[in-house]
Image (cartoon, rainbow, N blue to C red):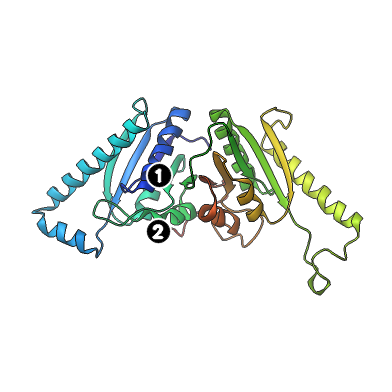
Amino acid sequence: MAVASVVVGVDSSPESDEALTWALEEGRLRNLPVRVVNVWHPTDDPQEIERLMELQSVVQLRAGLVDEVASSVRAVVEQAQATDVAVTSEVLYGHPVRELIRTADTDSLLVVGSRGRGSLTGSILGSVSQGCAQYANGHVVVVRGRRPDPAAGRVLVGVDGSSTSVQALRFADQEARARGAALQVVHAWTLPYLGFAGRSGSLPQDAIDEFAARAGETLRDSMRRGSIDATRPDVEMWLVEGLPNLSLLQAAGNADLLVVGSRGYGGWKGLLMGSVSAQCVTQAPCPVAVVRGGDDNPTNAP
């Protein structure tokens, strides 16, 4: 699925400013417009209540919010030196997760900060980033961690042989090419748990070798299905023995982007986001892209 636009949720917090900066760079790399969305809803914060009481009308409230958001967006655009990117901003009222998902079409890339702040001028992005990653109709990027070293130049993606992970691989390849970065493809595998006999101590070496060989074939097959030329000098294939979530998190240090499928072969099929993607969204040291495959159907959005 080709990305046609970038939608980013903001609330004027430092984390949402980072998300906006990331979205602006993405818009520049892909030559796409960036749509900045602030979703406002009232809270029981005393400062917000006091400020609301000073307003004379809903029109005054909306005008103030629109001006404040536009001013904040301009400041970030100028600081990011992204005046060449087509940017629009708007203020919506409602449930943050619902409104951001409704605004971002299936061909949009939805960008959110890992957390934000609750205030008059914003929704609590930290409480909705996982909701967006879970229920969005298209791909989602949760911007977190420190800025990567420009010299590192690498995009990391996890594959497990599922169709969604192959979609993630294709997305990661697009991101790596746009950045001129290395594409690092990781497949993590583990030996089976043998109950009271232990995890692997009683397995003969030829059985262990067979599991490793199957894992290697899964990695190579994922590359074939993703139409990725493994001989490219900018492509690296990593076969790692270990739990997928821990392997990806350990490998993601200093990466430009970690890409995962919304769910893979593990867990229940009804889940829209698996345990690996959920842990990456909450623990990764870098921005995380959650790629939704064609068979995902987020019909239970809040």
Q: Which residue does the image show at 60% across and 56% down from the upper left?
A: 276
Q: Nearer the N terminus, badge 1 or badge 2?
A: 1
Residue in the picture at 15% in, 61% down:
50
Q: Residue at x 51, y 55 (%)?
A: 282
> Which numbered dot is residue 104?
1
> In which quadrant of the rendered view does residue 274 lie?
bottom right
Q: Position of residue 290 (x, y in %)?
A: 53, 47
Q: Nearer the viewer, residue 54 or 216?
A: 54
Q: In front: 226, or 129?
A: 129
Q: Quadrant of residue 169?
A: top right
Near-viewer residue (167 or 54): 54
Say which residue appears at 40% left-offset and 50% top-offset.
Answer: 101
- Left or right position of 10 against 159: left
Disc 1 residue type? Ala
Position of 238 with respect to 51 (left or right) is: right
Circle 1 packing at 10 Å, graded few (<14), some (14-19), many (20+), is many
- Count neighbours of disc 2 (C-alpha within 10 A) and say few if under 14, some if 14 to 19, many if 20 or more: some
Q: Mark 2 = which residue?
A: 127
Q: Quadrant of the C terminus?
A: bottom left
Image: 167 above or below 93: above
User: The disc labelled 2 sits on which kind of residue?
Assistant: Ser
Element marked by disc 1: loop
Residue 287 place in picture, x, y as percent: 50, 44
Position of 15 with respect to 290 (left or right) is: left
